[in-house]
Image (cartoon, rainbow, N blue to C red):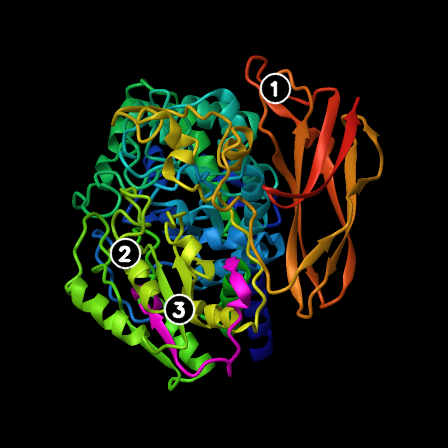
Amino acid sequence: MKKLFFYVLFSLLLLQASGQTKQIPVYLDDSKPMEVRIEDALSRMTLEEKIAMIHAQSKFSTPGVPRLGIPEIWMSDGPHGVRMEIDWDTWNHAGWTNDSCTAFPALTCLAATFNPELSLKYGNALGEEARFRKKEMILGPGVNIYRTPMNGRNFEYMGEDPYLASKMVVPFVKGVQQNGVAATMKHFALNNQELWRGHIDVEVSDRALYEIYLPAFKAGVEEGKVWAIMGSYNKYRGQYCSHHERLINQILKGEWKYDGVVVTDWGSAHDTREAALYGLDIEMGTWTNGLTWGQSFAYDNYYLAKPYLKMLEKGELPMSTLDDKVRRVLRLNLRTNMDRNRPYGSFTTPEHAAVSREVAEQGIVLMKNTNNFFPIAKDRYKKIVVIGENATRSLTVGGGSSELKVKKEVSPLEGLKIKYGADKVFYTMGYGSGPSVYDHFIPSPYNADSLKREALALVKDADVVLFFGGLNKNYQQDCEGGDRTSYDLPFGQNELIEDLLKVNKNMGIVIVSGNAVAMPWLDKVPALMQSWYLGSEAGNATANVIAGDINPSGKLPFSIPKKLEDNGAMSFGTISYPGDSIKQIYKEDILVGYRWHDTKKIPALFPFGYGLSYTTFEYGKASTDKKEYSKNDEIKISLTLTNKGNVDGAESVQIYASQQKPSMERPAKELKAFKKVFLKAGETKNVELSIPVKDLAFFNDKAHEWVVESDKFTLHCAASSADVKSSVTINVK
């Protein structure tokens, strides 16, 4: 009897459980197609719940639908590491003790690697850290084009060339998202300066828009399948970009068929009707200036909150646009926190440190190296003197939203002491810059003359001097919210370098920056490296390259003009940059970066794609598989590359294209392919690259279409935009 009772009880429980299984709502059933689940969830939501889903509930989260078990969406800056936790309703740091991250190099450094495979590793490591920290969205990568060296936020982006940025961003996005975390490409679009970013109205030709400023975004959408895109603060043709009929509805969601969410930058929404109708899906940060102030608990007053609800209830706006926004947010949920199979992530691991160091090592660019100044062997000198604040300064803090709280950051000075021994390395600041602050400048507390005198005294008997200068992440340096005010090195560095050279000429310069700088002392120094904000492993990476344990292979992702006026954007007066405070016109049009230098025959101080090595590479003559191609063909280019030196190294082979007789103006040449090739000492490899003929197109803004003309094209195999090794001409039918 007792056994019978338990058997009946067990059967009833089993039936109950079975019944419950059958009652699982469709939107929670991951065996069902995603779009079916979305429609089911949408059908169960109240109007108020829908409205709640599309705007913030805190500085970095949206509420989800608790009644239905649809989770909150949590976001975090930024593209170089997962930012420390921020208070719920203020910009203060939350004071957690478990939110220190791995700092990865800034994206200018990643671009300088010319290595898409490394970009995938970078994105994956960042995605793992974001997932471990329970983030659904990481607010990066940035792919705005380097238009001028004055832009304070260039360090967050991938250089001046749309093709390079496109090829580097796609694996980055895939790497992040394979961890169930949405990459958020930003800032869409035309956010190419920080000065007056909140209102400057950009006028640019359709041709430049499509050829220069949109390709990286398009690649991220169509090839990377990115899940989130952040709008920008500025206007384009009179309308704010975060709710823009043409940019978002017509191009992004129309032409490119984008199915993800569009989120504001913090405080970039300005109007309920436009936000409702012109493509914005999630509103964050309204009633703030983005970083430094905010109205307390204003979330219900956001443009897409109660004001939107009231307009819907009055029938002033269609329900269909709201439903489209909610579908997109639900799609984001299902791709991230409602995906039961997404990985758990990992945080501050040795593997992540190794990725950070590898990106840094491959991104450092050797610019000048007279008489083999570099590498500096461990037993070459007894007294190595290091001068410059950037040898010791933390460069993971400051810069605005890219600030990080790192678990570990090795400075260049630390790295050099580890490499050469503390008894051989001597240091003094030389100059001081003051603390990193987002929106204003705080002068250094140190006396500049005293710092200089100490530096001059120290270098007198030095065997070799290493000067670590450049910019930093102070206001009006490489920092969000403001542009640079001068092309020169700040804080008296140029004068200091000149004075140091009078005392000791055996000095190498390491410029740490995310931007080009003037170099009036270049002819007087034997050696120069372009470094970047290198993250947690900055010191180890720098020391490895200086010592020759790593052969430098970085290539410049932007041109360095001899003087500021040689830059295309800067050559047309203030209406081109920075504008008249209300409006600006991109007068250089499609001739951005090396396109300007090459076409106008204005030599750069250092060209795009430039970078030296501790070895030498010999290029064989380039050839193509055919001489004539149809417009649906793929061009195959091959050449031999030989490492002629006695150390292993890597070279980024670049292919540029020129059209012989275009019907519309085209640049002298445009990057169309590249490949990073690793060669042992003395090794020769056959290098093969391919270019789809369709990639030889230009955008005809009159017909609003991409056009490949029947014409002759010359393909230039090059080591930089200014160093063509061989050329081959083909015919396109």
Q: Are marks 2 and 3 in contact (CB under 8 Å)?
A: no
Image quarter hosting the C terminus: top right
Is the residue under label 2 in contact with that under label 1 (CB below 8 Å)? no
Q: Can residue 339 be seen here?
A: no
* Residue positioned 42% across, 28% down in the render: 279
Q: Amino acid at mark 1?
A: Glu
In the image, residue 81 sits, relative to residue 594, either above or below, namely below
Give SS at disc 2. helix
Taking the magenta stretch, the answer to whether it contains residue 482 is no
Depth check, mark 3 against mark 1: the one in front is 3
Q: Which residues are magenta?
A: 365-392
Residue highlighted by disc 1: 705
Badge 3 is on which residue?
Answer: 466
Cα–Cα span, label 2 and label 3: 16 Å
Q: Earlier in the sequence, mark 3 or mark 1?
A: 3
> Which is more foreground, mark 1 or mark 2?
2
Q: Residue furthest bottom?
A: 423
Count residues near mark 3 (Cα–Cα under 10 Å), then give few for <14, some for 14-19, many for 20+.
many
Whichever of callouts 2 and 3 sits on the residue coming sooner in the sequence is 3
Tag 3: amino acid: Leu
Label disc, if present, on residue 495 of the rendered structure: 2
